[in-house]
Image (cartoon, rainbow, N blue to C red):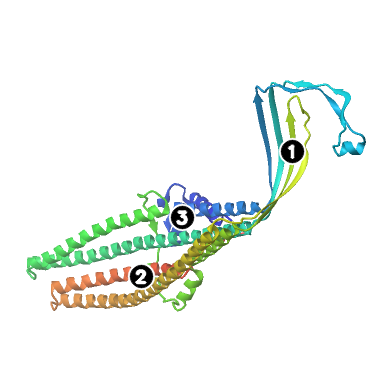
Amino acid sequence: MNQLLKYIASTVIVLLTVFGNTFAQKVMTLEECREQAIAFNKELKNAALQNREAQVNQEVARTAYLPSVGFSSSLMHRPGMDPISIPGHFLQTANSEEDAINGNFSGPSDVWSPGTNIDLGSLTLINSGFEVNQAIYAGGKIRFSNKQADAGVSIADMALNMKYSEVIEQTDKAFWQVATVEENIKIADEYIKMLTELEEQMTAMYEVGLQPASEKLRVTVQKNEADLNLIKARNGLKVAKMYLNQILGQPLDTEIQISHNASPEVKLFNLEDGLTQAGNKRNELKILEKQKEISELDAKITRADYLPTVGLSAQYTSYWVKDLYEEIDFQPMLAAQVSIPIFQWGQGKKKQRAAQLKVQQAVTDLQHTNDLINLEVMQVKVQVEEAYESILLAQKSVAEAEESMNETKASFEVGINTTTDMLNAQAQWVQAKAQLTQTIASFEVLKTRWQSVTGNLYMPEEEN
């Protein structure tokens, strides 16, 4: 109950306690970014509220088993009534009591019954009473409706987990985007430092006549291009941080700092049972299973609409008539009601047929989604394997590019290699380093993606 709302509330309190209004003072790890994103994500909060709404609807459905108690009162007033006149007459007589009881009168007697006049002017009637109603049998509608409410809670739980997975994936992508750009800036700084040293070396050689001006200018042009790329990278970092700030629910211009391992130990995890895990754990499939169950219950409820219903009621009522009966005297009354549908021109069968067609649609949707999820799992599996192989190749490329750059530098200093050779070797080293950084970030994001597509990315359980 309310596990995410409690989790969000506790996380918000911790975050506000730790760094108050100064988000920029905190160097955040990936886990801390995840926690803050969960705490501040508005869509996740809405999903938690929808989950609570489903639980309340479940509680409402349970009340259908209980009797309903009500009080009703009505007032009737008729003004301007005509007087009621009853004329006098002689009473009838009979030869015996038995004849009188049987209505066999012998004629009028000599006993006179005087007439009367009733002039009410108006009639006021008040009818009040308490009533208790209890459904005894409704064709199973109450039971089926409660099962639907239970399924609604399960769907809300799974939708909440799906939104949690989306937030985690989104946060990881933004985090590793910032990390990648930061690493690329470090590489660019190192590259510019190399070019600056080479430029100074070429300037010295030019001044003593060992190199023409064109060779020195070639290095200067390359350095200017590197400076421009560094400016673009820094602007890209600002944009990446804005996106991460937006996910974390803090001002876009917050100067967020992140902490990550630039050279993590990369291991390929088990990818063999991905399809089985996805088939058993994916919330999309579980939701469609529940929607299919709800459609089947709709069909049963439709059928129940055309079955007999039985109910009981107990009433405690009283009447009050002005000038005639002004005593308040509540009297009990019990009643039973049976309703049996007989003929509706085939309406019931047609509605049941329509409900069964909805069940078939739900089954088809489930099968189609299962096929798409299987395809998605296989695609991510290929991407993970490709990312892992790319890291191994990128690591090899970095080592070879660094060795090539060192060899080229040594040969350049003794006049064997040209300036162009030196620039190319440095550029290849930069490209290899940047490629390694990108492949590592992609692999980290794909690890989270694999957890998501196999149904293993769940929000923490509520602690008791």
Q: CA distance from mark 3 to mark 2?
A: 24 Å
Query: Left or right: where does residue 449 sit relative to residue 348?
Result: left
Q: Given the image, on which type of amino acid does mark 2 rest?
A: Ile
Q: Which mark is residue 326?
A: none
Badge 2 element: helix
Residue drawn at (22%, 61%) of the image:
229
Question: In front: mark 3 or mark 1?
Answer: 1
Q: Indicate the quadrant containing the N terminus: top left, top right, bottom left or bottom right.
A: bottom right
Q: Is residue 359 above or below residue 322?
A: below
Residue drawn at (21%, 70%) of the image:
427
Q: Is residue 24 above or below residue 386?
A: above
Q: Indicate the quadrant containing the C terminus: top left, top right, bottom left or bottom right.
A: bottom right
Badge 1 element: strand
Report if residue 29 is visible in the image. no
Other-residue count near label 2 (Cα within 10 Å), few / some / many at <14 / 14–19 / ≥20:
many
Q: Given the image, on which type of amino acid does mark 1 rest?
A: Thr
Q: CA distance from mark 3 to mark 1?
A: 61 Å
Badge 3 element: helix
Query: Left or right: where does residue 359 sit relative to residue 239?
Result: right
Q: Position of residue 289 (x, y in %)?
A: 51, 66
Question: In front: mark 1 or mark 2?
Answer: 1
Q: CA distance from mark 1 to mark 2?
A: 80 Å
Q: Which mark is residue 440?
A: 2
Q: To which residue does mark 3 refer?
A: 36
Residue drawn at (58%, 60%) of the image:
303
Report if residue 162 is visible in the image. yes
Q: Is residue 84 above or below residue 188?
A: above
Q: To which residue does mark 1 refer?
A: 317
Q: Position of residue 205 (x, y in %)?
A: 11, 68
Q: Position of residue 285 (x, y in %)?
A: 48, 67
Other-residue count near label 3 (Cα within 10 Å), few / some / many at <14 / 14–19 / ≥20:
many
First in sequence: mark 1 vs mark 2:
1
